[in-house]
Amino acid sequence: MLSLFACSTTLTAGSQTLPVKTLPAVSRGWKTDRSPTLMPINAILTDIEGTTSAVSFVFDVLFPFARTHLPDFVRQHAEQPQVAAQLQAVRTQSAEPDADVERVIAILLEWIAEDRKATPLKALQGMVWEQGYNAGQLKGHVYPDAVDALKHWHQQGYRLFVYSSGSIQAQQLIFGCSEAGDLSSLFSGYFDTTSGPKREAQSYQTIANATGVAAEEILFLSDIVEELDAAKAAGMLTCGLARDGGVLAGHRYVDSFTLIDPASF
């Protein structure tokens, strides 16, 4: 049976966090086409790839690691229930119910090459990455400005959640075994594509219902306009992360977490 979180830092709700750097409540750098709302923000929901963490970490580190190690992982663990269930899901989604293990591996590698947001692929990638984190071969990348802001917001009492196309397991590993140490105690929950596609408004309403926080009291952070649009359609407030200096039309956007003041929304 695979075990989660055997990396050097134990991921527990009571883990000690590093000292918080006090961030100023700044408004410089805001670009917006909407007026601030009077509804207070009680929770912050953040994307990972391109938002808290570098896209290059995913594409240049995590994906190649999974591509290299996934075939042998599947062969070695194909009979384990949690792996077997994902392999069966691959057969179902690919409409190849009789595919043997080698064919399933080939399908998975095709999906990796296509950056397919398939739930069974994400689940299996998470298992492979777990082994890498446990062996010290991987450390989660989180931008320093995101680390500082997340700690600050947690200290201020905001509930923090993650929503990523990567599996919940992969999300927990990035933050729990990060270059900045164990950040897992900052978060109240994690959501992946089992809550729905990230570009559909219903997914964000589903997440709001699961958190018990009204959508209007949740601030969603992402670098993808279509995701911000979907969250906005569900009633959430939004802020884009344009780390490369681009434009995220229709939303407030900044190039650093340190410029985000939840109280200004």
Image (cartoon, rainbow, N blue to C red):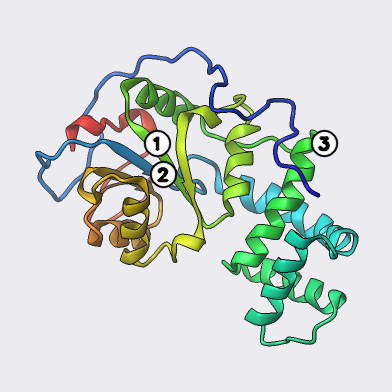
Distance between the Cα atoms at labels 3 and 1? 28 Å
From this viewpoint, is residue 240 visible? no
Q: Residues within 10 Å of mark 1 (few under 14, many from 20)?
A: many
Number of the front mark, 1 or 2: 1
Label 1 close to label 2 by CB (< 8 Å): yes
Label 3 close to label 2 by CB (< 8 Å): no
Q: Residues within 10 Å of mark 2 (few under 14, many from 20)?
A: many
Label 3 close to label 1 by CB (< 8 Å): no
Q: Earlier in the sequence, mark 3 or mark 1?
A: 3
Residue holding disc 2 = 46
**Residue at (37, 62) in percent of width and height:** 203
The quarter of the picture where residue 96 lies is bottom right
Residue holding disc 3 = 135
Q: How many marks?
A: 3
Q: Secondary structure at mark 2?
A: strand
**Residue at (54, 27) in percent of width and height:** 13
